[in-house]
């Protein structure tokens, strides 16, 4: 056995033999192409990913906060002026003042606007703030500084962006606590003409040290703490497992179907595999969400099917897109397409399109963003409800890529059947010229050789009634020489030279 192996190895060529020069050059060209393609794909993907989340504070003014003062006291007006001036900082959200407007004329109306997504949040100076503070400073009445201002927030937008905007708003209000306390103390001394000792004796200590603070009212909290992480990871899991795996599985068994089965049946079978596998994966993914939901959320059966439908729409959009790539893209570039697609959707999951550079707001059209938006709306009891937009986007993407994939499957099936395309989406290599067949001296011509020889002679012989051309005469002389050698006859020197 070892001897036979050695004999086989002796018949093979070494890697750097001259005969394999063309093969080595083709291999080197392929490696160079892959190097260029994946270097480009890597840098484009990384730049897109980090560009989507780069320095979003530059666009923080795109996030708007509602401001309204419901207290008519001079103290409240002074505080309102300081708050409006504080939010003029370039690192603070845009504050829209509605104090003198009929719009948002109640706390409930403002909270409803934030819940619907008309604003990222709101700052409210509560009614009675000035009177309570005055009583606390002059009479020592009980006082809660956090009752002065309410900061209304929500979590139904992208969680990283919401966290950044809310922290910026909190930073502005926190920075105003010390200056406002100093201002109030100076006003009291100026108006009453009293000294500091008498003020401290008669005033509520909390009101004197901190005349105002704020309370946070989250009108759209998530149902459970891990939801922001579970949803992103689970959507990514559905995308990878639900679309890449069935596509690659089909790639390994597709050849007999393309060559022997009707195109309409191939398209139907491919769609069935995609939908069945996506359904199987999304049911399990929904189970993962429910298994790790925590004790604070008691979902219903409707919640289960709603989350499942969101996962399924997202997965089908990607599955049919991968189908298009596998039926059209050269295999050398296929993995690059997967890589780029994955990074674009990671950007939508990690950073989201809000507050991005205007170019990166194309992520609003990415199925991953729409799916995340639907899930956040579902898990915040309907806050920031953009379900019509999100469902439409994902259905349109799924239908669009499915229609394109049916066209590409039909195109590939036709080209494969005609022999113009291989299963790897590349044209077949050019056919090699027929090799010359060596004929032994005493061997008799086979019937196949005789028929081929007759066809060759008939194609080389001039038609009747014409004089043979020099090339035709030369061909006839060569064929006569070949016949003479096969029969053992002696050929003349002239015939030998002609041959």
Image (tube, grey):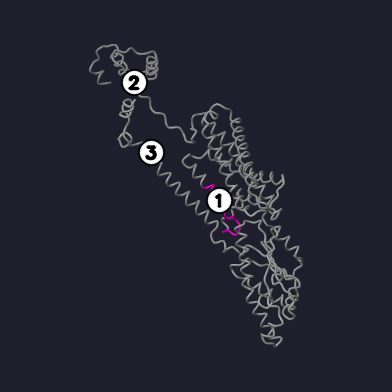
User: Do the residues bearing badges 2 and 3 touch, measured as CB atoms within 8 Å?
Assistant: no
- 2 or 3: tag closer to the N-terminus: 3
Q: Residue at x 34, y 19 (%)?
A: 468
User: Dot 2: within a 10 Å radius of its alpha carbon, few (fewer than 14), some, or many (20 or more) residues?
Assistant: few
Residue behind mark 2 = 437
Front residue of 40/143: it is: 143
**Quadrant including the C terminus:** top left
Q: Residue at x 55, y 38 (%)?
A: 247
Q: Does dot 1 land on a helix, a strand or a loop? A: helix
Q: CA distance from mark 1 to mark 3?
A: 36 Å
Report how far apart the C-alphas of labels 1 and 2 lie in the structure.
61 Å
Name the residue carrying label 3.
Answer: 26
Whichever of callouts 1 and 3 sits on the residue coming sooner in the sequence is 3
Residues at circles 1 and 2 in contact by the CB criterion of under 8 Å: no
| Pick the front one: 108 or 477 | 108
Q: Residue at x 57, y 61 (%)?
A: 56
Label 3 residue SS: helix
SS assignment for the magenta stretch, majority? helix
Q: Name the one closer to the observer, 263 or 27.
A: 27
26 left or right, relative to 271: left
Q: How many marks?
A: 3
Magenta-span inclusion, residue 29: no
What residue is pinned by disc 1? 346
Q: Are marks 1 and 3 in contact (CB under 8 Å)?
A: no
| Magenta extent | 340-356
Query: Is 458 on the left-hand or right-hand side of 198?
Result: left
- What x and y, as percent, mark residue 284? 62, 42
Q: Which mark is residue 255?
A: none
Residue 113 seen in render = yes
The answer to whether 318 is drawn above or below residue 221 in the figure is above
Mark nearer the viewer, 1 or 3: 1
Quadrant housing residue 182: bottom right
């Amino acid at each position: 056995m070892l001897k036979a192996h050695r004999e086989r190895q002796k018949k093979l060529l070494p890697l750097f033999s001259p005969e394999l020069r063309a093969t080595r050059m083709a291999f080197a060209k392929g490696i160079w192409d892959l190097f260029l393609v994946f270097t480009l794909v890597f840098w484009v993907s990384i730049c897109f990913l980090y560009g989507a989340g780069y320095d979003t504070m530059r666009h923080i003014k795109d996030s708007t906060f509602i401001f309204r003062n419901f207290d008519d006291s001079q103290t409240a007006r002074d505080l309102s002026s300081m708050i409006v001036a504080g939010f003029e900082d370039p690192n603070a959200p845009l504050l829209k003042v509605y104090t003198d407007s009929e719009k948002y004329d109640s706390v409930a109306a403002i909270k409803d606007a934030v819940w619907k997504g008309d604003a990222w949040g709101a700052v409210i100076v509560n009614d009675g703030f000035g009177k309570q503070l005055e009583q606390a400073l002059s009479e020592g009445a009980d006082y809660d500084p956090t009752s002065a201002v309410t900061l209304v927030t929500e979590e139904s937008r992208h969680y990283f962006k919401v966290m950044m905007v809310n922290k910026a708003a909190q930073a502005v209000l926190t920075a105003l606590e010390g200056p406002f306390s100093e201002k109030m103390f100076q006003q009291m001394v100026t108006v009453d003409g009293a000294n500091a000792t008498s003020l401290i004796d008669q005033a509520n200590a909390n009101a004197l040290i901190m005349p105002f603070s704020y309370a946070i009212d989250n009108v759209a909290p998530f149902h459970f703490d891990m939801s922001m992480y579970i949803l992103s990871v689970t959507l990514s899991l559905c995308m990878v497992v639900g679309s890449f795996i069935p596509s690659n599985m089909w790639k390994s068994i597709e050849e007999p179907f393309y060559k022997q089965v009707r195109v309409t049946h191939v398209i139907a079978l491919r769609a069935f595999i995609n939908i069945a596998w996506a359904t199987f994966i999304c049911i399990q993914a929904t189970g993962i969400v429910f298994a790790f939901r925590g004790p604070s959320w008691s979902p219903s059966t409707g919640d289960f099917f709603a989350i499942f439908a969101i996962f399924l729409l997202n997965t089908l959009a990607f599955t049919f897109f991968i189908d298009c790539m596998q039926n059209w893209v050269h295999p050398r570039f296929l993995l690059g397409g997967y890589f780029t697609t994955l990074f674009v959707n990671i950007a939508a999951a990690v950073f989201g399109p809000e507050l991005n550079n205007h170019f990166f707001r194309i992520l609003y059209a990415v199925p991953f963003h729409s799916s995340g938006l639907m899930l956040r709306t579902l898990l915040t009891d309907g806050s920031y409800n953009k379900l019509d937009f999100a469902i439409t986007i994902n259905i349109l993407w799924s239908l669009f890529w499915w229609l394109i994939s049916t066209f590409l499957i039909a195109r590939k099936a036709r080209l494969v059947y005609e022999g113009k395309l291989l299963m790897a989406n590349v044209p077949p290599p050019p056919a090699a010229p027929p090799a010359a067949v060596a004929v032994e001296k005493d061997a008799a011509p086979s019937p196949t050789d005789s028929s081929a020889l007759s066809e060759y002679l008939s194609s080389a012989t001039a038609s009747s009634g014409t004089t043979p051309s020099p090339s035709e005469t030369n061909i006839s002389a060569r064929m006569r020489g070949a016949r003479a050698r096969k029969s053992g006859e002696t050929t003349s020197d002239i015939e030998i030279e002609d041959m």
